[in-house]
Image (cartoon, coloured by chain):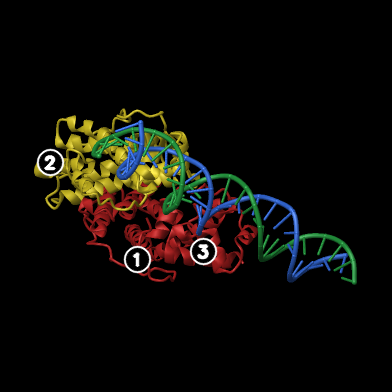
Chain colours: A red, B yellow, C blue, D green
DNA sequence: ATCACTTAATGAACGGCGTTCACAATAATT
DNA sequence: AATTATTGTGAACGCCGTTCATTAAGTGAT
């Protein structure tokens, strides 16, 4: 039943954007009365957080195939490329996950899932960065895998989120967003490498996304 | 009168966060009835956009002192540092300006102000990047000032916005946000330079902000 | 001074939102 | 069959943005 509610919410979200996800509409979709939802969720907030957890799993599914790459460095690069594509193909989800301050989730089970490379995509990414550090790929002064992971993440996040928030503003004469993303990605990684110049030409520009959804290169809902 | 309305809105925004900026509360503050605001603004949206324009001017005021630096490269670095501090000190304003998709502003006057280095901070930044390009500071393959400006902006934006959106989530074991910002800033600039190694130690960690406001290292309103 | 006329401001309402709560319907247990 | 949990409901509350007919106040011409 929780699942039926979340399904309806997901559909609304995918087809009409975040602002359309209202308790009343969700209730309409499953033909219940609005108050009923409160029997299954504390809050609207809790419902949204449940949605976000699904999206986080989606990120994991998008990211994981990159583990198949041969070397740590290739895995690192591939991660970044997959992340970029994920963010650009699902701007609404991306916005909900990473551009909206959500109340910190204090469910201890949720906390455990984080930082675990098996279930958490940040944890997985971090572990690959650590591989690179251990393999001696980075400059001597770069030893903090955490700092590296968070910095690369932030950089890619910057390109994606700025594109989502301001990409529609044509006063800026934007360069193609993927050009910016790849440029920055290479800049970061090459800047960290001890032996630079192992430059792969570009990211494979598009990779399939795991979950199914009405193909939305979604309109960003203002 | 428009100004009185905007003042009230600004106060509400600064003291209680974006979500507290409601037409009814603004009307209360200036002791008018809610409907009156519609005599001076088309929309709530137009009112918010007027607020954003003020903030944009504030960014300009924060950024401009960096023009006093001696060399193009120093100006470039100083810009980035000022921008970082601005974003970290005024998260609510930052969120409103750069993390919320706003309807594109089609006022032609507004459009003209953009891209003009005199009034638009992006334009000013771009002109400094162009200086660096013209001075031959960058690698031979880096000639597109626009791409450079947008990429550096995106990188710094990533650190700031990720901090605002997810910085409260302590499951990530965040490194200090300024460490991340400076790390990435140096990484980007040094990666672009033709002759690397002109590394200034760090940013002067804090610089005064131009406009006055109840000193808010504001709580990020969820 | 009176009238017409523009402008400023209002009160009441509309529809939508999240949320609450007393109550009805249904299912489970004894 | 009677009692007790569990599920679902309708109506309301207070908030929101927005609209509109109506009043109040100022202005210029006659």
Q: Which residue is drawn at 22% across and 62% down?
A: A201
- Residue placed under numbered mark 3 in the picture: A9
A130, B1: nearer the viewer: B1
**Looking at the picture, does residue B31 appear above or below residue D21?**
above
First along the sequence among labels 1 and 3: 3
Residue B196 at least partly seen? no
- Residue placed under numbered mark 1 in the picture: A217
Q: Quadrant of the N terminus of chain B?
A: top left
Horizontal and vertical percent position of residue B7: 37, 34
**Looking at the picture, does residue C29 appear above or below residue B111?**
below
Horizontal and vertical percent position of residue A163: 30, 54
Q: Residues within 10 Å of mark 3 (few under 14, many from 20)?
A: many
Mark 2, chain letter?
Answer: B
Considering the numbered disc 1 on the image, is that residue within a helix, a strand or a loop? loop
Q: Are marks 2 and 1 on the same chain?
A: no
User: Which image quadrant is residue A44 in?
Assistant: bottom right
Q: Check contact, mark 1 vs mark 3: CB within 8 A.
A: no
């Amino acid at each position: 039943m929780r699942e039926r509610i979340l399904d309806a919410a997901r559909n609304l979200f995918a087809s009409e954007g975040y602002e359309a996800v209202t308790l009343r509409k969700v209730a309409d979709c499953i033909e219940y009365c609005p108050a009923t939802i409160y029997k299954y969720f504390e809050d609207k907030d809790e419902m949204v957080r449940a949605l976000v957890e699904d999206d986080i799993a989606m990120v994991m599914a998008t990211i994981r195939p990159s583990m198949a790459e041969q070397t740590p460095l290739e895995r690192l690069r591939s991660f970044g490329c997959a992340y970029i594509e994920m963010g650009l193909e699902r701007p609404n989800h991306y916005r909900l996950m990473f551009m909206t301050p959500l109340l910190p989730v204090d469910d201890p089970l949720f906390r455990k899932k984080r930082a675990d490379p098996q279930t958490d995509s940040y944890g997985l990414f971090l572990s690959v960065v650590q591989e690179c550090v251990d393999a001696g790929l980075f400059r001597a002064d770069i030893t903090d895998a955490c700092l590296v992971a968070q910095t690369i993440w932030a950089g890619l996040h910057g390109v994606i989120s700025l594109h989502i928030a301001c990409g529609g503003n044509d006063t800026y004469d934007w360069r193609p967003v993927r050009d910016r993303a790849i440029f920055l990605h290479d800049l970061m990684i090459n800047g960290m490498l001890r032996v630079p110049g192992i430059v792969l030409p570009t990211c494979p520009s598009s990779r399939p996304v795991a979950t199914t959804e009405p193909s939305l290169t979604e309109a960003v809902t203002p």
